[in-house]
Amino acid sequence: MPRGNSALSAASPATRPPEHVAIIMDGNGRWALAQGRAREWGHRRGAEAVRKVVEAAPGLGIRTLTLYAFSSDNWKRPAREVALLMRLFRRYLSKEAARLAENGVRLRVVGRRDRLAPEILEAIELAEATTVHGRRMTLRLAVDYSSRHALLEAVRLAAADGGAADLERDMVAALLGRATHADGPSPDVDLLIRTGGEQRLSDFLLWECAYAELYFTPTMWPDFTAQDLAAAVRDFGSRERRFGTVALAG
Ligand code: FPP
């Protein structure tokens, strides 16, 4: 049945927590510059915010959390900044994997893997293997991620599988999962949060956000806390989700 019809019987406004929350973690650089520090300082503090938010998310009922850690366009940044981001990312994987596993969090890195350094790939594979049994929440870190590239890859995969003429929506989600090494279909986003005051999607989960509720906050990512995440989840609870249909009277 199309999702729009099944949504008629769904609770409205949304009383359930968002199953899939995706976050565009923006504002690290501006946060640091505002304090007279180098942009890199903002990324270091941003990595601490990641730890806290990931720890809080399962307790809020979130089943999948996707964090935009490095977009495919971020390669255009100064080499020094790219190198630091990769270091922070690798450190996060190696230091946090055991803790994530203890907390029942399964980690997947989504995006391209053909341009990552061997030591990063090794850290990814180890962290994914360490956390493979996590059932409370899936944490998806988007690294070298571009939604348009993922869609192109999905089309190529479909063509290689014998053509795209009979494709259905669920199959696209599965192809997107394959295209981004997600180990399963790429789930629809319920709530998309963007910090740092900008209001755009920046090539993030374009297919998956078709019916996402959007939440923009001026808070810079290093200042974003578990309480801020809880506030966004509460705000989601006040949204009326209609999926293109109309609200039922009475
Ligand atoms: C955008 O801020 C943020 C990024 C491009 C990188 C996000 C990285 C982290 C939060 C830290 C490392 C991540 C992990 C998973 C350990 P920006 O620098 O574009 O901010 P600006 O808009 O103020 O310049």
Image: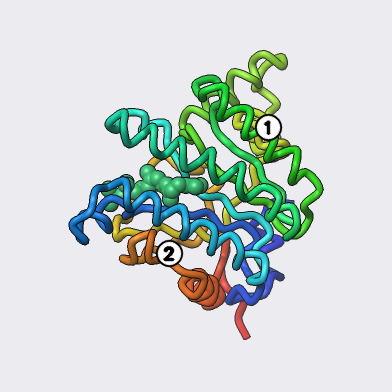
Q: Which residue is mark 1?
A: 125
25 to 71, vertically: above or below: below
89 to 77, vertically: above or below: below
Considering every residue shown, the one lying at the far bottom of the view is 250
- Would residue 179 appear left or right of 98 to someone viewing this image? left
Residue 201, percent from left and from top: 39, 47
| First in residue order: circle 2 vs circle 1 | 1
Q: In terms of depth relative to the viewer, which is nearer, 93 or 170?
A: 93
Q: In terms of depth relative to the viewer, which is nearer, 195 or 248?
A: 195
Q: Which mark is residue 55?
A: none
**Amino acid at pointer 2:** Tyr
Residue 47, percent from left and from top: 46, 52
Ligand 1 closer than 8 Å to the CB at disc 1? Answer: no
Q: Is residue 68 visible?
A: no
Residue 158, percent from left and from top: 66, 21
Q: Which mark is residue 215?
A: 2
